[in-house]
Amino acid sequence: MVADYKKDIKEYEKAAKKQDAVGNYAKETLPTLRKHLETAQSLEGTTTTANPPAKSPALIAVPAPAAGVPAPTPETTGGEKVR
């Protein structure tokens, strides 16, 4: 990601030298790209991710039904019966 931002910044710097709408857009966008590069560089060393890939199927904890309420069944939940 860092390499991509560096490449983009070089391209935008080149475009910013033009005296047209593209150049104006590039000049306005460069500060944002530089900030994103700084953020990417600060995150580059981290090893954890916000959403790591699942190693097994997700299990959802379902609380026990209230007293007197029957437990859900595949027919009432629309799912398949799991053993």
Image (tube, grey):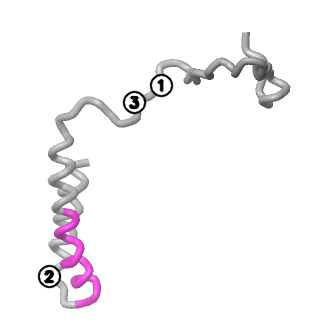
Instruction: Quadrant for residue 28, please give it.
Output: bottom left
User: Label for residue 54?
Assistant: 1
Residue 73 position, x and y percent, is 80, 21
Q: Amino acid at mark 2?
A: Lys
Comparing labels 3 and 2, the label whose residue is closer to the camera: 3
Are there few (<14), some (14-19), or many (20+) residues within 10 Å of tag 1?
few
Q: Amino acid at mark 3?
A: Pro
Please state which of residues 18 and 34 is positioned toward the viewer in this rendering. 34
Q: Tag 3's secondary structure?
A: loop
- Which tag, 2 or 1, sits closer to the chain's start? 2
Cα distance in 3D space between marks 2 and 1 = 47 Å
Asked if residue 21 is among those painted magenta in the image, a careful observer would answer yes
Q: Amino acid at mark 1?
A: Ala
Q: At x 18% / y 57%, what residue is drawn?
A: 6
**Circles 3, 2 touching at the beta carbon (< 8 Å):** no
Are there few (<14), some (14-19), or many (20+) residues within 10 Å of tag 3?
few
**Circles 2, 1 touching at the beta carbon (< 8 Å):** no
Cα distance in 3D space between marks 3 and 1 = 6 Å
User: Which quadrant of the figure contains the C terminus?
Assistant: top right
- Report whether 54 appears left or right of 47: right
Please state which of residues 17 and 34 is positioned toward the viewer in this rendering. 34
- Which tag, 3 or 2, sits closer to the chain's start? 2
Q: At x 28% / y 83%, what residue is drawn?
A: 22
Q: Residue furthest right?
A: 75
Q: Which residue is mark 2?
A: 17
Q: At x 80% / y 23%, what residue is drawn?
A: 74
Looking at the rendering, the stretch of residues picked out in magenta corresponds to: 20-33
Q: At x 26% / y 80%, what residue is drawn?
A: 25
Q: Which residue is mark 3?
A: 52
